[in-house]
Amino acid sequence: MNKTTKLITVLIFALAMSACKKDVKPTVDEDTTNNNDTAVVDTTPVRTDGLICCNPDDLTNPASLLSQRVVYFDYDQATIASEFREMLSLHARYLQENPSARMTVEGHADERGSREYNLALGEKRGYAVANLMRAQGAAVGQVIVVSYGEERPDATCSNDSCWSKNRRGVIVYTAQ
């Protein structure tokens, strides 16, 4: 009878432990179909007709909009300012014309707020950039979003000037 009691106790303990499984949300997400809490994306087309697009050499040509890779955000926001829309539309057009091209959009936040909050805000910023480019014609599989939150600051001082540099989305081409 002692063995039966021990066996039942172990089974109950194992059952209780499996019921307490903790779901952990990864910070890197390639599936964008379930991200409904991101910022509203204005999908109004931006005219890029007059711009010559899209040569892979333009990605490194400082005179080209394609060499620009950073989108800055206002404090506690994930809304893309109009000044970045033309650049993002051109990147989307580049992705359309180069189906083998791939990019990662890195979402960042300043140091204010908790680590968890800043990771979530960085993710929203990354998806705001990715969703705008997808709305402009980039394929879903071409754009991956990752959030670094406050973990990779561009500027390390603690004032408004530095914080504004850290509130950003960064485009990194992984295949051209």
Image (cartoon, rainbow, N blue to C red):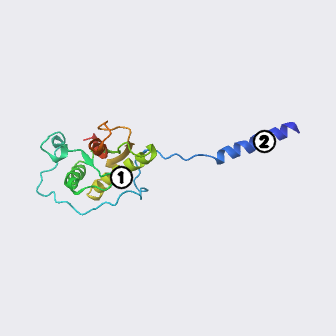
- Residue for badge 1: 76
Q: Which of 148 and 150 is in front in this view?
A: 150
Q: Name the residue under label 2.
A: 9
**Quadrant occupied by the C terminus:** top left
Relative image position of residue 104 (x, y in whole percent) = 32, 44
Q: In which quarter of the image is the N terminus?
A: top right
Say which quarter of the image contains residue 102: top left
Residue 20 in sight in this render: yes
Residue at the spot 19% in from the left edge and 60% down from the top edge: 46
Q: In the image shown, does 3 or 119 lie closer to the viewer?
A: 119
Task: In this rendered view, identify the residue nearer to me: 71 or 64.
Answer: 71
Numbered tag placed on residue 86 in the rendering: none
Q: Is 150 situated above or below 38?
A: above
Q: Distance between the residues labelled 1 and 2?
A: 50 Å
Instruction: Tell me the amino acid under the disc marked 1.
Output: Asp
Task: Please indicate, yes or no, whether residue 102 appears anywhere in the rendered image.
Answer: no
157, 74: nearer the viewer: 157
Residue 120 image position (x, y, % from top left): 42, 49
Nearest to N terminus: mark 1 or mark 2: 2
Residue 100, x across and y down, in percent: 27, 45
Task: Classify residue 19 as left or right of residue 111.
Answer: right
Q: In which quarter of the image is residue 83?
A: bottom left
**Residue extending furthest toward the bottom:** 44
- Asked if labels 2 and 1 touch by Cβ distance under 8 angstroms, the answer is no
